[in-house]
Amino acid sequence: MYQSFLKPGFDTLVIAVPFVSVLLIGHFRLDQIIAAPRRKTKPMAPAFRLDERGRMLMTDPDGRPWKAPAPR
C-alpha cells in the first residue's frame, strides 16, 4: 500500500547510525558526563578528626592541624 522511503542498504546505515547515537547520548546525558571537568585536587578533609588519644582535633580544610593565633 505505502512504499517505504528508507530502503535497506548502506545509505540508510550512514544516516541512521549518527542519528541513533545522538539520541542515545542525549537520552543518557553522556554529553554532560564527557564534558564535565576532571577533579585534579583531592577532596577536602573533614573539619574535625580524632588524634591518637581519641581527643577532638580541629583541622584546616587541607588537613593540617589548626593552631590558635598567638596573642598580641
Image: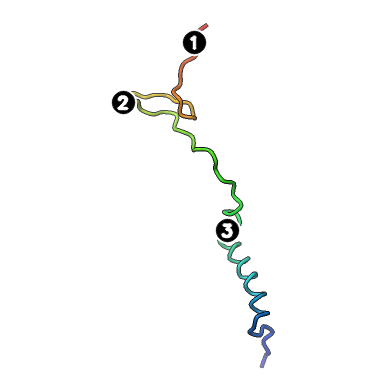
Q: Residue furthest bottom?
A: 1
Instruction: Give the vertical position of 62 relative to 32 (above or below).
Output: above
Q: Residues within 10 Å of mark 3 (few under 14, many from 20)?
A: few
Q: Residue 70, which numbered label?
A: 1
Question: Residue 15 location, x and y as percent?
Answer: 67, 74
The amino acid on which the numbered mark 3 sits, given as a three-letter code, is Leu
In the visual, does 42 lie left or right of 17? left
Check disc 2 and report the residue beneath it. 54
Real-space CA distance between mark 2 and mark 3, rounded to the nearest whole angstrom: 45 Å
Q: Residues within 10 Å of mark 1 (few under 14, many from 20)?
A: few
Instruction: Give the vertical position of 29 relative to 72 (above or below).
Output: below
User: What is the secondary structure assignment of the residue under circle 2?
Assistant: loop
Q: Earlier in the sequence, mark 3 or mark 1?
A: 3
Check disc 3 and report the residue beneath it. 30
Real-space CA distance between mark 1 and mark 2, rounded to the nearest whole angstrom: 25 Å
The amino acid on which the numbered mark 1 sits, given as a three-letter code, is Ala
> Would you identify the image quadrant in which residue 31 lies?
bottom right
Q: Residue at x 55, y 41 (%)?
A: 40
The amino acid on which the numbered mark 2 sits, given as a three-letter code, is Gly
Q: Residues within 10 Å of mark 2 (few under 14, many from 20)?
A: few
Q: Residue furthest left?
A: 53
Q: Residue 51, which numbered label?
A: none
Real-space CA distance between mark 3 and mark 1, rounded to the nearest whole angstrom: 52 Å
